[in-house]
Amino acid sequence: MNVCISKKMSNFAAEFREELYMYTNNKGIKTALDGEVMFVESMREMKNLATMRTSFNTVVFCRSGRILAEVGGLQQIKVQSGQLLLIPHGKLVQPMLVSTDLEASVLLVSDHVLKTALGNQINIWNRAMYTKELYVVEEAGWLNGMEEYARAIFQEDRQPKLFREVFYSFLRTMLLMICESLINNEEMQLGQDESTTHDKELFNRFLQLLGREDKKHRPVSYYSEQLNITPKYLSTICKRVSGKTPLRWITDSVMEDCYQLLTQTDLTVKEISNMMGFPNSSFFGQYFRDEASMTPIEYRNEHKGIR
């Protein structure tokens, strides 16, 4: 896997598509909207999956069997028959266990298309994915019908003249149904959302900046300057929208990159420290231990067997 952990969005998406084709041997992949949406008919075709930071928002339809995955470097998620696994754009995911009886399909949607399809409701998705970290949608009666429609719309030999409009309509319906399920989750009810639309827009721009940076280990002021606001105002917005400080967001993103580099490359701790922008490997080691409760080498030894 390329050790560069952040790329220009178009190149990153293209490289992710190439990586997906490598995993599937180009079997069962359907594309739409100029490659910004992809559909993998059977997850069984995805062999030897390794840790990856997805450049697409990913929806996994689990019809039978189960999946165990690690999201964000530490959090383990279990998905069972009848459930959806949601992986937001830019999130680190590591498949750990896929049962032999797994029957699942995968829908991948670029960030641009997701935002276009959801419109103002993108805030529901962002709140659920990035603030509440709700990656599993419980069984719902509409899932099977929606997946069947997804299969049908991708298998059209002859696309209708209004395909783009039809496809966006389908995508918006499906994503809104997912958001409706997320809204009804008890976790989404906790904590009153007092943020304004302007707050959410600035917060989303902060997340985009964070996702594009090669070296994320930077002070809050670095990001606030690019948003033309003060560090204090950025902190207020982040706390109001997500309940987390911008420093916490930066640290979490830095750690995800560290987890990926430790498990998917043979770079030394010193090389990773330099790449991430730390002043020295000792500082990096202490930073990592404070967050992961283990050293970088201990994390690598514990996780590299799952590569």
Image (cartoon, helix red, strand yellow):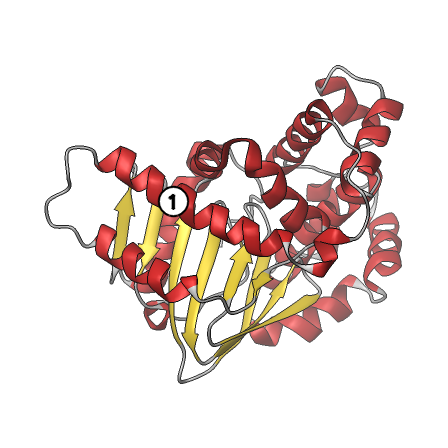
Residue 47 image position (x, y, % from top left): 38, 70
**Residue that carries the numbered disc 1 in the rendered image:** 171
Residue type indicated by callout 1: Leu
Identified at 74% across, 52% down, the residue is 189
Residue 261 image position (x, y, % from top left): 63, 55
Which image quadrant for residue 150? bottom left
Q: Is residue 170 above or below residue 141?
A: above
Q: Is residue 227 above or below residue 113?
A: above
Residue 278 image position (x, y, % from top left): 80, 42
Identified at 27% across, 34% down, the residue is 164
* Observer-nearest of 16 and 80: 80
- Callout count: 1
Q: Residues within 10 Å of mark 1 (few under 14, many from 20)?
A: many
Residue lying at the far top of the rendered structure:
228
Which image quadrant for residue 142? bottom left
Identified at 51% across, 69% down, the residue is 139
Q: Quadrant of the C terminus?
A: bottom right
Identified at 57% across, 40% down, the residue is 6
